[in-house]
Each structure stands twice: as structure tokens, then as C-alpha cells.
Amino acid sequence: MSTDSRHRVAQWLARNSWVGPLVALIVLYVLLAVLVPDTFPTAGNVRTMIRQTTVVGIAALGMTLVVILGGIDLSVGSTVALTTVVIAYLLQAGVSPMMAAAGGVMMGAACGVFNGVLITSLRVMPFIVTLGAMGIIRGAAKGLAHEQKIDAPVTWLNNLIAELPDGSRWQLLPPGVWLLVILAVVVTVLLRYTRFGRHVFAVGSNEQTARLCGVNVPGVKVAVYVISSALAGIAGIMQFSRLTVGDPTVANGLELDVIAAVVIGGGTLSGGEGSILGSIVGAMLMTEIKTGGTHLGLSNWVQEIITGVIIIVAVALDRLRHRRTAA
Amino acid sequence: MSEPRLRISHVSKRFGPTAALSGVRLSVAPAEVHAVVGENGAGKSTLMKILSGALTPDDGDILLDGSPYCPADPLDARRRGVAMVYQELSLAPHLSVADNILLGDEPSTAGFVRPAERDARARAALEQLDRADIPLGARTGDLPLAVQQLVEVARSLAQSATRVLILDEPTSSLADDDVRRLFTMIRRLRDRGLSVIYISHVLEEVRAIADRLTVLRDGATVGEGAVADTPTTDIVRMMAGRQLDELFPRSPHTPTETILEFSGVAGVRKPDAASLSLRRGEVVGIGGLVGAGRTELMRLLFGLDPVRRGTIRVASRNGWARPRRRLEQGVGLVSEDRKEEGLALALSVADNVTLTKLRGLGPGPFVLPSRQQHASSTWVDRLRIKCRSTAQSVRELSGGNQQKVAIARLLHHDADVYLLDEPTRGIDVGSKADIYALVDKLALAGKAVLLVSSYLPELLGVCDRVSVMHRGHLGPARPVADLTEHDLLMEATGQA
């Protein structure tokens, strides 16, 4: 291979940062399939892993936008918890499941308006605003639920990411997972092919330039935080589906898993970079490590250490690749 | 002269109590390169921000092709035909070339970008620069700096309405080859009828590229005319508001023993094989164009970058050393980039001045703020640093005073060798005069000063000997008595 084409490959790798994590995902899959051939590579286990990735995956779609924008959203876990509470309340009150879910997403979007408006109007760093929002939203969820789990009547919402019953195996995956796929495609199109998407990248890459070029910077920021929180709301529906109750204490620390997924997938916290595909692969990789660890009989603490190492290694490799192409 | 393309009269702008502009006039013809020159703080950038729509004037009239011009924001200005290329490149490094060129003005249907049309318009803009070879899909941040600048110019040209192109210090980060190419491009655009406003304080460039010029000082127009009819000395006098020789106090220096000597020093890229010896009690200047490798040389000497070849000797000690060791040896550096590198902007004047030598400012490992303040206030007085107190954060000081704080650190450290990299860049004339006087005093006190400067009168006015660097090659140091600005310029551009 000539140096020129090698350089081109290196550049392609740097620009498509999802490739590395995807290779890691596949290598790890093969490795675990060899190590635990009886239980790990079964269709059932793969489906379970995909189902378990849905909540983090959907929230990671929004977080990818936020990270590309150069921001961060620490309130995602709290938003998910608040959404489960709201949905349970609405169901209890006799609202139809569809409307209850919509109500949950609206509540999520409202959290995003709160974050976005404070970030742009007070000019406080997103880290601080969303750190505050994390506490405020979590507190609101607990207050609303009187610090208890809220039971809800059984509806189809409970089956969104459950294992499919025998009669509907032709659907391959439960509807919640399909929703993740559809949303991922929609957000990818939004990022790649619309003016709004270009503007998100531009603001994250160089906010000053974006302003000089007439981009509505505050508008783009608020929109991104609203979209992100609305997606956290949808992740909340999935969380509710798994729990079947509204729980204000659920998803504690979820935001860190979500941020980790985005960062493993090539997002940089300084903005301008990140991809939807990468974030999904990042989320899958983390589930794979946890599941694989369980199948191998590794203790929880070992899995946590491995996940932590993967985050640092993934980002370090990404930096290394960037330095190569820059030189 | 025909009807001017752009006519500015009596434009004023105040920021709080200070008047940034008071009664500026400027008249630019079609198909003309018009230089706007002036010291930093003269009001050039404020005026250009008004033209590009980033600021609105308090008072005054601006006519663009005879009709009133008052843009609401930068995008409005671009749409009306006035585009600006900023000194600090304002590109989004992660976006593609085509996306950058059309940023904020993407052709779209219902929010969806029309890629074919975007690429066609971007290519047309690059073709105007005869640079259709720049790949539209490349990530802008991956391209060389000079190419990035062209992308930014192309962004201005992508607006078909563009009649006035403003270039703010466009050569400040370019190598000399790229400067020549940029000038060719500017001439081509001018010949197509564009008015180009060229902002610079490098008079050699103004001579090379501009047809007419306007000189600003203290927010007002103090002179204008055809470049060919205005001698450089007149321009400098108008810019500075005083004769040059008043700026440079000169006492006879008597150099003694050699304190810094290097030979055949080469860095990773630049310089290659630089040699010089510096004696106590003398000031040696290093001239050359930006990008010639002068800053790289200073960084090698101070141990910030690795030396590939060659030897460095400080007094009797041989070899390369890290900054920590260099400071112990009495070598101090004032970085050209005082904001990013030279100063801890958030910290106080006292902290910045005493940073390299905290020992002795308290018992054992402790540092007493009172002693820190006492030590720094001596230098604040001696250098006439204007600050409320030594506890004031350096960020709040003017550029000239910040630079004095950076130099005060070396004085507090009691360095013997002063490596000063562009110490007067971007500061006001008064502070410049203070710094020149200080350099003179240092030499009298038996210190050695190595001064990098792009400003030729400064090199000739302050130094005892001057050596010129051209593309990483350092020429011999010659006494200033044997040199003229013309000699230095020829050598710096590689024509000697």
C-alpha cells in the first residue's frame, strides 16, 4: 500500500470514528462467543442485549447532538425518572397509553426548554446548568411521586421492549427497538442533510464563526437541548416499559452511561465531532461488556473496571488517530 | 476620481467613557486596494467591525455606491456586498470546505440542504481565486493554514453581491510564499473591479499591495493619499504621532563577556543550523518575516522544544535544558503570545510577576501575599504598569501593561539573558517607548537581550547588532550602523 493511500485510509478512519468501536464490538463478540459458546452467541442473548441497549441508545441520540454542539447534558437520568413518574400518573388518571407516553415526552421537552433557555440567556456553562437541572428535575420527580413508586395499570406500554411473544416473532425485535432504529435514522438525516444539522456542527466547531455567518446560535442551542430532552423522554417511556411502574429514583447515573456511549463512538466534548452510528455502537459495546462479564462469571466490580478502561482507551485511540492525520 | 465605492464620513463610536472612533473618514474607489494602517488601538478593528456589521456606529454617514449603508448584522453586510476576512481565521474546522463557504447561507428546500447547488456555488467561488483544486469535501481543519485562508476569502466571494472585501492582517500567519500568492490573488480580484480594504501595520506589505492608504490614529483619520506619493517615514510619523528617533533612547553599550552562545542549532522543522553569540551588555536583534523560524529558535534556546542538532552554551554550562533549568541559569523568555502562553490571565499582577521565583517570599515552603505584593509593587512602579493594585487580575490590564507584567517577571527573577519574542506587538506607542527604554537600561546594567521583532525601525533603533532569519536560516549578526531597513527587508525576503 502506498503512503498516499495509507494516508487516505487514515483520514477516512479519522473522519468515520464509528469504525474503531464497531471493530471492537465485533472482536469482543467473537472473543466472547469463543469463551462462552453455549450461552453468549445465542439469538436469544443477542436480542436481550439489544433490548437492554434501547434506553441508553435513545438517550444517546440526543446526547450526540448536545456533544456535537460542544455542550453536555447531565440531567438525562433525572429526566428519564421524571418521565416514568408522569406516565404512571397519567395512566392512573385514565389517560390512554398513547397520550400518557406523549405527555412523558412533552415533560422531557419542557426540561430541555429549561436547560436551553438558561444556558443561552444566563450564559452559564452547560455543565453547571444541567448539573443544577439534574438535581431540580430529580427532586421534582420525587416530590411528584411523594417519594414512592407509582403503580400503573397494565397497558401495551409494558411490552415495548419486552421479549416478543411467540406469535409475533416475525417482527424480529420488539417495537421499542424499532423505534430506536427509526429515530437513529431520523436524527442522522437531520444532522447530515439539513441546514439545522450543519449549524449544529458549525456552532460546536467554532461558535464565533457561526455567529459571524448569521447562524441563530441561541436558537440552535435551545433546539438541541429540547430535542435531546425529548429523546430522554422517549428513553423514559422505554424505562417505564421495563419497570411497569413510575419510579423517581430510577436511572440514577444514566447520564454518565449515555455520555460514555457518545464519547466511545467518537464524540469529543470540545464539540464539532460525533456520530449517531458511533454513539449507538458505543452503547452496544457497553452492554456487550456487561453481559459478557456476567456470562463469564466476572464480578460486577470487574465489569465496572473494564467499562472504565474501555472509555479511556477508546478516547485515547481516537486522539492518537487525530494526531496522525494532523501531522 | 470617480464616485467612490465606499465613503465614510464623521463616523464615531464610544464604548462607555472611551471614544474608540471620533470622526473617521475613509473613501475607497472601485477596483482599488486601499490600505488602512495605524498602531494597535488606533481604531482599525472598530471601524472594520462597523463596516462588517458586527457593531453599529453612534454617529456618522456611510455610503455604499451612493446609497446609505447600515448593516444590521454580519450576514446582512455580506448580503449587501461587504465581506470581511478576519485575522483569526473564522472557519469551522470540523465542517467541509463547501459547508464553510456557504455557512449561514446554505441553499435549501424545507430545511434540507441542496448539496449539488451548494457545491456548485462553492466551486464557483474557488474558481474566482483560480483554486478550483481545493477539494470541496475535505475537512477544513485538515488543510494547511494558507489554504484555509483562501477558503475564508472564497466564503466572501460566494456572495455574488460582494463589492468590498475587507482583509484584516491577512498575512499574520502566512509563510512568505503564501504571502506572495495571496497578493497575486488580491490583485486579480482588484482587476475584476472589487474594492479591497487591506488592514495592516506592516508597511512593507502596504507598499507592495496597496494603491491608496488611510492612516488612523487615536480613532481619527490623520492622513490619506496614494501609496506611491507617501514616503514611509511620513506614514510612520502619522501613525506614531511623533518622530521615530524620539521613541528610541540610545546609550552607548559596552559588551563584555559572552553569556549565551549557540552554534548549528536545528529544531524539528525550523531553524536549521542557527549560530550566534550574545554578550553581556548588548542587545542583539533577530529580524525576518513571520514564519521564518524565529519563535522556534527562541523556544529551542529556552528548552520548550527539543534540539535536533547543534550546541547551546549558557555562560559556562553546555547543552540543552528544560525551562526550569534555564530559569535557574538566569535565562528568561517573554513569549510572543502573552495571552495563551506568557501570562496566567486570571491571576493577579503580583502572582504573575513572582511566579518563577516564589522562594524567599516567605518562611520555608510558604508564600506570604504581603511579600509577594511588596516585591511586585517595586516593578509596577519602575515599569509604570498601570493597574489598580498588584492584586488586580492581569486579564483586566491593557495589552501594553500586560506585556510589562511579562517583562517584570524576568526582572523579578533577576535574569541575565532576556529572550524577548515580539515584545511590542500589539501594544500602544507609549508602552513601546517604555519597553525600549527598559531594554536600553538592561544592556547598561550588563544584561544580555535577544530581541525578535518583525518591525524594522525597532530592530535598527534598539539593537546593537541584527541578524536576519529567512526560512529557518539565520544570517550573520551585523552592527546596526552598517544596516538599513532596505538591507533587512531584502535579507528577510531572501533577495540578499
Image: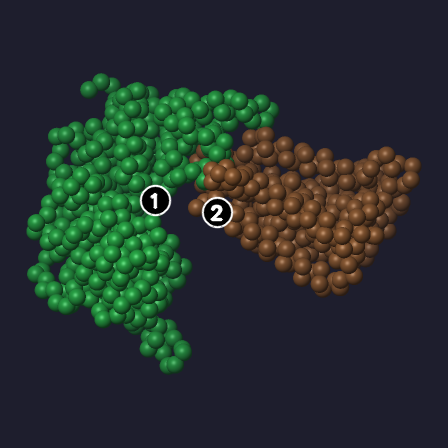
- Residue underneath mark 2: A324
**Measured from the top left, where is residue A295 in percent x and y?**
79, 57
Q: Residue at x 74, y 47 (%)?
A: A53
What residue lies at 91% left-to-right and 40% top-to-bottom?
A166
Q: CA distance from mark 2 to mark 1?
A: 46 Å
Name the residue located 33 percent from the left edge and 58 percent from the top edge.
B307
Against B192, residue B471 (above or below) is below
User: Residue flagged by tag 2: what amino acid is it?
Assistant: Arg
- Chain B tint in image: green
Q: Secondary structure at mark 1?
A: strand
Front-lying residue, B71 or A296: A296
Chain whose colour in the figure is brown = A
Q: Is residue A173 above or below residue B117?
A: below
Q: Position of residue B211 (x, y in %)?
A: 20, 28
Is the residue B116 above or below the residue A157 in the image? above
Disc ID at residue B15: 1
Q: How many marks?
A: 2
| In this picture, residue B421 sits left or right of residue A217 | left
Q: Is residue B55 left or right of residue B44?
A: right
Seen from the viewer's position, the closer of residues A182 and A196 is A182
Q: Position of residue A138 (x, y in %)?
A: 70, 55
